[in-house]
Amino acid sequence: MKVNFESIKKRLKKHWALVWLVSTLFAVSVFVVFASYTGVNSVKRVVSTRPADSVMFSSNSLKSSATSQRLSSTAYTITVCNFAQENALEVNPDNITYTLNASLAIKNGNDFVKLSEYTGADKADYISKLKLGTNEQRTYSIQFIKDDENATGLGDAINLVTESDYSTTFTTNCALKGTVSSTDSFKIILDDAEQEKTEPEFYIYVEAVPSSPASLHTTLSNYFGTAESTAEAASWTGELVESDDCSSVSYDFYNYVLTGSGVGTVDIMWDSTKFEINEFFFSELSGNEFVLYDSNGEAAETGSIIKNATRANWKMVTLMVDSTDINRYQIQLYKVDGETQYIGTNSASNFIDCEFHSENSSS
């Protein structure tokens, strides 16, 4: 049966909010997916037999192999999701339950050690650094801030400094509903004193350990710290998910991902003769916030989200960003002309760009 991709594109655009919230993609053992989500060298579509749940337990910052992440601010939001990070519509068909653990840790040389594993004088020394006075401690906390089913009563922030073994565990509401895009969010706070230092003194170690389904057994984890040097290094960048092979493969639509840290605005610019952005990205349902522009292209209290960019035929929107709340955005780009091949020197990556402006910068 011949597939009309122009018709599919129009239906996706028209009903995107419904697709995003309900997700009509049911995972089966063998299913048809667009090549832009598979990484294989096929222009139109392929058949994938990849086990769905092998990649559909993910996070914006927790990894399958623990590393460390230097944050530009003392607050950061960590997500736990039931989909592949490059495609929120490719969801796990099964309900997922997991445990989320958080611990205070110290970097010793090239290794990280949990504070609870220290003994004797070394442990006493670190504990003394966490005290501000007789009844006061520094703050290294974690809080369950958003459940995928909007459960209430998730609890207050837990200061790891005051917890037994300087760690805590979340199990209640740590569940992700299958067949639809589901995300839980946790917020960590690192003590303000960290940003007076050139290197992080204490880290928060976070791990998400799945307990079901039985076939899902990859633990996601990472160490988070901040310091004066990273506080000045706020940055947001954008990249096509298909960037590895978009110079040689032309897709039916593309995914542009913005990631970063810090507070400010990101100008997203694209050639409107080549691509149009999914309307859901601009809608109130998306939760995204934009700078408004008047008819002269100047920032105003009321006006339009989209304005003309300086390059001929290019459009621009200015997204307001704060990595404390959201540190990753995914934007769908649709071809204006579905028959045009964007390969070689005409690669799709030539027609979208972004520029970050830090809140603390005069630029």
Image (cartoon, rainbow, N blue to C red):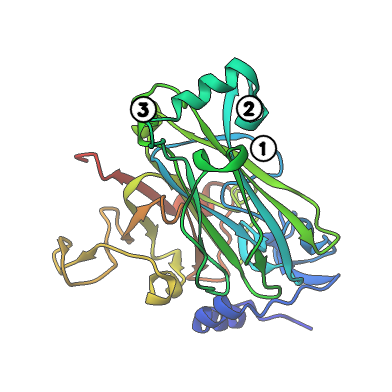
Residue bearing the label numbered 3: 228
Image-based side of 144 in relation to 42, left or right? left
Left or right: 360, with 15 as reference point: left
Amino acid under label 1?
Answer: Ala
Q: CA distance from mark 3 to mark 2?
A: 20 Å
Quarter of the rendering containing residue 236: top left
Q: Which residue is mark 2?
A: 112
The quadrant in which residue 111 appears is top right
Mark yes or no: residue 290 visible.
Answer: yes
Task: Name the kind of residue labelled 2 in the image.
Answer: Phe
Q: Secondary structure at mark 2?
A: strand
Q: Amino acid at mark 3?
A: Glu
Residue carrying label 1: 66
Q: Residue at x 44, y 56 (%)?
A: 326
Query: Considering the image in quadrants, where does the N terminus appear?
Result: bottom right
For residue 14, side relative to residue 179 (left or right): left
